[in-house]
Image: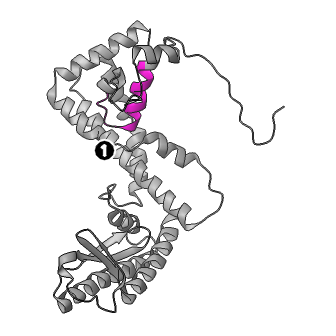
Amino acid sequence: MYAKASVYFDYKQMEGTMQIDPGAWRDLQLAGSSSSSNGKQKCSLLSSLKHTHTKMGDRLLRANILQPSTDLPTITGRQHAIEDLLDNEDVFFGLSASLAEFPDIDSVITALVRLPEAKTVRQATQVINNVLHVKHILDIALAVAGTLNGAVQSELLCEISTCLSEPRVSELLDVIHQVVRTDIQVEKSAQAIRSQRCHMVKNGFDGFLDVSRDIFDTVSQQVVDLVEQYADRLQVPIKAVYRPNIGYIMSCKADCVTGGVPEEFLNFVRKKSQCTFTTLDLVKLNNRLASVVSEINILTEK
């Protein structure tokens, strides 16, 4: 009998691995802290070998150092894979470039299996992000498979290529492409990410969504036009800056603002060599954009 909403854990020791106690970790400096108590840098085996491109690689490297394999076929298989990569520079650098684009797959899977408590705009936004990340992972997986296919000889790399080349990968990507635009990629800047979420679904799937996106594009252009009007009227190089928590604000160099600050500029902040401010008209456009983006995210999630 177990209590309601409890989790049952069954601990089993992994076979074919060596168990090293934490005291030995520290004495052998396998994965110690990056700095010691006196502030000096402290070297460890993990820090010396850590040249991974993904967070999954970081965790796997740490696990293999602290819990190394004792299975001889596994060890020799990894050694043959390393020799294969060292003998083929094109494959090595191609894999390095592709792996650097991978998001944290563990975090994506966790987000996918988590059941939302209620349907909210934030939850709809997370669903959209999950779909984009899954699409991005599948695209990179096929790229990695194409890099390995026919170019490697080791059994381990051939198995990886076979797994990534499974028809189910392409089939799942085709299902996503039925709704999501094929040219959508994972962006890094907050402004590009918001625009990406708004335009990820192909045109024609939902009339209300198409109208909302047209409004989003129109209002976004109005922000650009408004900033240009202020720049032309005041003869100051003002630019629009997007902040995720407040929307668009205006920014210019501090030495361009001489004399008094115009009364229409609100929340004027001078920080080092930059000045940031907003206006009532820009606040209104930000509020309208926030409303439209929320509507688009809810329609896109459906």
Kindly identify the residue that appears in the image at 21 percent across and 36 percent down. 94
- Residue 74 coordinates in the image, percent (x, y): 39, 13
Q: Please tell me whether residue 23 is drawn above or below residue 209 in the rendered image.
A: above
Can residue 93 be seen here? The reply is yes
Please state which of residues 137 and 165 is positioned toward the viewer in this rendering: 137
120 vs 68, left or right, is right
Inspect the magenta stretch and tell me whether residue 242 lies in it. no
Looking at the picture, how far across and down is residue 236, in whole percent?
Answer: 18, 84
Residue shown at the point (28%, 30%) measured from the top left: 51
Q: Where does the image place residue 220, in percent across and percent down from the top left?
A: 33, 79
In the displayed structure, 82 sits above or below 203; it is above
Residue bearing the label numbered 1: 101
Name the residue at the top extreme: 72
Q: Does residue 208 appear anywhere in the picture?
A: no
Q: How is the image coloured?
A: one colour
Query: Which image quadrant is residue 209 in?
Result: bottom left
- Identify the residue at image location x=52%, y=13%: 19
Three-letter code, disc 1: Glu
Judge from the rendering whether residue 302 lies leftward or rightward of residue 278; answer left or right: right
> In terms of image quadrants, where is residue 248?
bottom left
Q: Quadrant of the N terminus?
A: top right
Residue at the limit of the structure toward the right, as seen here: 1
Element assignment for label 1: loop
Q: Residues within 10 Å of mark 1 (few under 14, many from 20)?
A: some
Residue interval drawn in magenta? 50-65
Q: Position of residue 188 (x, y in %)?
A: 32, 56
Among all residues in the image, which is located at the extreme front? 38
Secondary structure character of the magenta stretch overall: helix
**Residue at the image point whose x is 34% and y is 26% from the top:** 42
Tally of numbered discs: 1
